[in-house]
């Protein structure tokens, strides 16, 4: 990829697009070599790319994104068509009141999974004692339909052959059937927990899942829309922040929001503020989609979070959806 080729790709996309469509394309190329006094030596050359398409400038705009190791895998045309299919009508109506179902796009679901990754699974959160999972490993923490796996070998994400200390890549189940299994374990945490380090280290004293998957369920898009009947569709959560690390309470601006009714996306909604607790959200799962989308996160050359659509129920007390204020 070169700047000229990227410009040509986006130009072709724009020429085939409609009025008010915006596309952004980024890419990285890198080489990494790791050597240790134990004789471990590894090296790799990698590329990664990401794309985001927004159709429309009003609330209810269609949004879609993706990441891949190759331009062919990125498939800009497919991302644009997904964004177009999510674009709502220009008229905006108020959001429904009270606890309602929420249908999260793959991109929005991936954003929540990445928030959980940074705040609860990273070894640094355990060292500081602020991880939600401290003293909860081995316990049910989410709905049984929630399975989180860090898998740097899965080609559907951004695969990478080793962690940044040279340990060979392998899948690590972090949450299975809603039960917390393990955080990312660096050398120091390995001694504290009496467990071996996981191949997720970015430094001797820091480990972070870099290829986290919310594993897909069996629900089709039609079944997800039925599960979220009478609720709200959210295309993107931007910005998204945790304001209480221990309880994983978060605040996000829900963009590209639309009503869900009659088994389809309906009227457009204004941008909304969503406040909730992530453990509660992932305990109120209605359905998990079957189609995955990888989103570049953090150091996009090495990391991605991959998720399907996810239908949940918003909180009725101390949280929920409300109008965003500019």
Image (cartoon, grey):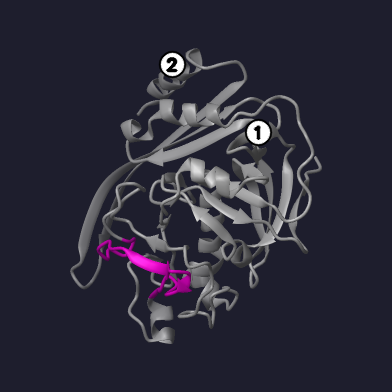
Quadrant of residue 165 within the rendered picture: bottom left
Left or right of 71: which side holds 142? right
Q: Main secondary structure of the magenta part?
A: loop
The mark closer to the camera, 2 or 1, is 1
Asked if the magenta segment contains residue 54, the reply would be no
Residue 92, numbered label? none
Residue marked by disc 1: 266
Sequence-wise, which precedes: disc 2 or disc 1?
Answer: 2
Q: Which residue is mark 2?
A: 12
Residue at (61, 35) in percent of width and height: 265
Q: Helix, strand or loop at disc 2?
A: helix
Classify residue 62 by image quadrant. Answer: top right
- Viewport quadrant of the N terminus: top left
> Which residue range is magenta in the image?
163-186
177 or 63, which is in the foreground? Answer: 177
Total label count?
2
Check the image and name the residue furthest to the left.
39
Task: Where is residue 36? Give x, y as percent.
Answer: 25, 68
Q: Residue at x 34, y 75 (%)?
A: 197
Q: Nearer the viewer, residue 274 or 229?
A: 229
Residue 167 in the magenta stretch? The answer is: yes
Rendered residue at 76%/45% (across/down)? 96
Q: Where is residue 229 shown, x and y percent of the image?
A: 63, 45
Task: Find residue 241 and report its horizontal and vertical position in percent.
Answer: 65, 56
Q: Is residue 226 left or right of residue 1?
A: right
Q: Give percent across and percent down for residue 281.
A: 61, 61
């Amino acid at each position: 990829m070169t700047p000229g080729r990227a410009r040509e790709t986006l130009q072709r996309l724009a020429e085939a697009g409609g009025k008010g469509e915006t596309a952004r394309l980024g890419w990285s190329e890198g080489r990494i070599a790791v050597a240790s006094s134990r004789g471990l030596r590894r090296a790799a050359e990698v590329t990664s790319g990401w794309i985001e398409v927004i159709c429309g400038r009003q609330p209810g705009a269609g949004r879609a994104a993706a990441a891949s190791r190759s331009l062919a895998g990125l498939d800009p045309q497919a991302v644009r068509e997904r964004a177009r299919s999510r674009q709502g009508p220009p008229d905006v109506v108020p959001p429904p009141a009270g606890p309602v179902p929420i249908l999260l796009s793959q991109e929005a679901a991936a954003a929540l999974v990445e928030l959980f990754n940074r705040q609860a699974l990273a070894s640094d959160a355990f060292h500081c004692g602020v991880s939600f999972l401290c003293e909860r490993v081995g316990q049910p923490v989410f709905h049984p339909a929630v399975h989180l796996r860090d898998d740097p070998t899965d080609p559907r994400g951004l695969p990478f052959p080793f962690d940044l200390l040279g340990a060979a890549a392998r899948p690590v189940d972090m949450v299975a059937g809603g039960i917390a299994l393990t955080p990312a374990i660096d050398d120091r945490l390995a001694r504290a927990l009496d467990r071996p380090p996981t191949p997720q280290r970015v430094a001797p004293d820091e480990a972070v899942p870099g290829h986290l998957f919310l594993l897909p369920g069996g629900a089709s898009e039609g079944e997800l829309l039925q599960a979220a009947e009478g609720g709200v569709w959210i295309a993107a959560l931007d910005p998204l922040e945790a304001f209480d690390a221990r309880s994983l309470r978060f605040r996000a601006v829900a963009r590209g929001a639309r009503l869900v009714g009659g088994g389809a996306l309906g009227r457009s909604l204004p941008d909304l503020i969503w406040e909730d607790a992530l453990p509660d959200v992932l305990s109120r799962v209605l359905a998990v989609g079957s189609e995955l989308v990888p989103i570049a996160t953090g150091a996009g050359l090495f990391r991605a979070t991959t998720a399907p659509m996810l239908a949940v129920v918003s909180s009725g007390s101390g949280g929920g959806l409300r109008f965003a204020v500019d």
